[in-house]
Amino acid sequence: MKIEKFFLLFALSCSAFITSCKKGEHGPPGNANVEVYNFGSQTISGGSANYTLNISRGKIDSSLVLVYYNPSTEQETTWYPIPGIGSGSLYQTRYFIYQTSTNPSVYTLAVRLVKMDGAIYTTPVTFTKLKVVIAPASSIQNASVDQNNFYSVKQYLHLADN
């Protein structure tokens, strides 16, 4: 009986504490211009596959690009990042993007499969799905820091002396 009263009192105290918290102020608006390109099934048998992106040069040059795929050997909810080690650690994935047309602006996302030693992986691999996420930057700043100089990096990142 005492334990039940203790837990009831504890639960009431927790709920009172949570609901009485002051609401925080709203932050600045985020970037809602994120684009997602979804591609269907494709079997890669020569170690490479190409995907077309209808995107401007300005956007591709100022955006974060993330690529994920679902290999046919995995559950349909499994997503692997590119670049990275593939399913079963049998291969590595890499990608690069290049412009194939200027009018209209078209870019190609080239996906490459290689063995761990860098040689082309020729065993057929089926990507059930491929997803490309393009997130434009809200602001772009050129980092003018000498990354080979610890003190420059320390100053740039505002790191304290320890």
Image (cartoon, grey):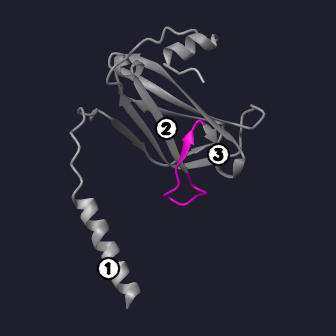
Residue type for callout 1? Leu
Q: Pointers 1 and 2 in contact (CB under 8 A)?
A: no
State how far apart marks 1 and 2 are (Cα).
49 Å
Q: Label 2, on which residue? A: 67
State how far apart marks 2 and 3 are (Cα).
13 Å
Residue type for callout 2? Val
Determine which of the numbered discs, if any, sits on residue 118 in the image: none
User: At which x and y percent is residue 130?
Assistant: 48, 44
Sequence-first tag of 2 and 3: 2
Does the magenta-highlighted stretch encompass residue 48? no
Question: In front: 154, or 36?
Answer: 154
Residue type for callout 3? Gly
Q: Is residue 82 above or below residue 140?
A: below
Residue found at x 53% / y 10%: 145
Corner quadrant of residue 60: top left
Corner quadrant of residue 162: top right
Residue found at x 48% / y 19%: 158
How crowded pointer 3 is (Cα within 10 Å; few <14, some 14-19, many 20+) is rated as many
Determine which of the numbered discs, if any, sits on residue 86 in the image: 3
Q: Is residue 76 above or below residue 120?
A: below
Question: In front: 49, or 148?
Answer: 148
User: At which x and y percent is residue 26?
Assistant: 21, 39
Residue found at x 35% / y 17%: 58
Sequence-first tag of 1 and 3: 1
